[in-house]
Image (tube, rainbow, N blue to C red):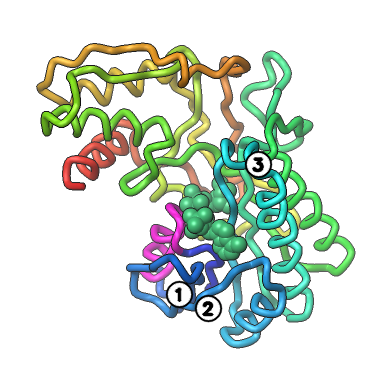
Amino acid sequence: MKSLIIGGAGFAGGYLINELSASGHKVCATCLTNEKINQECIVRNLDITDKNAVYQIIEEFSPDCIYHLAAQSSVSLSWKNPQLTTEINVIGAINVLEAVKNFKNIRLVLIGSGEEYGFIRENACPLRESEPLNPGNIYAATKACQEMIGKIYSRAYKMDIISVRAFNHSGAGQSDIFVISDFCRQIAEIEKNIRQPEISVGNLSAMRDFTDVRDVVRAYRLLAEKGISGKIYNVGRGKAVSIQYILDTALSFTDKNISVVRDPKKMRASDIPIIEPDVSEIFRDTGWKAEISMEQTIRDTLNYWRNH
Ligand code: A2R
């Protein structure tokens, strides 16, 4: 099986290259010219806002399956630069759809986000895929838009498209703008005595669903192999935990005595109390469920920061 990963230099991309290679796929991954892919595979430079270049890569590699991961994936940058976010996440996705339209027998896996659900109804959790989308930020709106346009292409042109709403994923190598990585980095810096023994935190009562990135990319592979064309799938653990639990777990892995300090900059006014997906669809169609424990993910992320 030949797999093309668009956006292969990002956090999930590297793990997906490993997952697909280990399963015997021939992998080609794309990255921007200023990025680097360290995993073993065919590498091509691609900016998805260049529609001709998207077409050419697909024509050259002739994949059986394309995983579309490339995105402007920062929520905060999406507020600062909504035009760029829309250009990459919506126009870029249309460039991929337009290119794939010209080829037969390519399965396209469009990676969206749990953020698409946005301001959810009270008691709506666990969120089923049929739940109405109510995006609360520009990033989420562009991902919802990608998914809707994908659905239109799949119906109108009979294209083989699977849409994914990926919830929070974490693991070694993730940027410290995300909570698990942020806590682990701070603890590692305290251990190295380059930070005061104080960890700064935001809202600890919010409950979120976290999955190890290795489980997430396995879900992407299984969806490509066994997912039902035209369907949308939540990818997540299906069991939200509080940020307090993550903090306590991360702190339990260090011998240092660390005090916890609330940082008002990390508090969000509109924090939704709980966000948790229903993951029965993906389980039913592929047998996938998260296997790596939260504790293992936190330990691996902490060890990553200890070594970096
Ligand atoms: O923004 P950068 O410099 O980190 O590069 C990102 C890249 N990217 C692009 N690739 C091609 N053409 C573009 N115009 C373009 N703009 C950005 O896509 C990055 O290397 C990659 C996306 O990876 P991450 O931002 O690390 O996201 P992650 O965690 O791997 O998530 C994969 C997908 C994304 O679509 C998320 O929105 C979704 O899963 O949750």
According to the picture, the residue beneath numbered tag 3 turns out to be 139
Given contact means CB atoms under 8 Å apart, are the residues at marks 3 and 2 in contact? no
Q: Residues within 10 Å of mark 1 (few under 14, many from 20)?
A: some
Q: Main secondary structure of the magenta part?
A: helix
User: Residue at image x 35%, y 43%?
Assistant: 171
**Is label 3 in contact with label 1 (beta carbons under 8 Å)?**
no
Q: Nearer the viewer, residue 148 or 295?
A: 148
Q: Residue furthest front?
A: 80
Q: Of the numbered discs in the image, which one, if any, rests on residue 2?
A: 2
Q: Nearer the viewer, residue 198 or 171?
A: 198
Is 277 positioned to the left or the right of 216 in the image? right
Query: How far, Cα to Cα, is label 2 from label 1?
Result: 6 Å
Q: Is mark 3 within 8 Å of ligand 1?
A: yes
Q: Are the two marked residues, 2 and 1, in contact with CB atoms closer than 8 angstroms?
A: yes
- Magenta-tinted stretch: 9-22
Residue that appears at 34% across and 36% down: 181
Circle 2: residue type? Lys
* Vertical side of 243 occupied by 57: above or below: below
Which three-letter amino acid code belongs to the residue tagged 3? Tyr
- Label drawn at residue 25: 1
In terms of depth relative to the viewer, which is nearer, 154 or 243?
243
Q: Which label's residue is closer to the chain start, 3 or 1?
A: 1
Q: Which quadrant of the figure has residue 40? A: bottom left
> Which is closer to the viewer, label 3 or label 2?
3
Q: Is mark 2 within 8 Å of ligand 1?
A: no
Spot occupied by residue 84 in the image (x, y as percentages of width and height): 67, 52
Q: Residue at x 31, y 46 (%)?
A: 172
| Residue 22 makes an appearance in the image | yes
Q: Is residue 281 visible?
A: no
Would residue 37 appear left or right of 222 to someone viewing this image? left
Query: Residue 289 colored magenta?
Result: no
Outermost residue to the bottom: 60
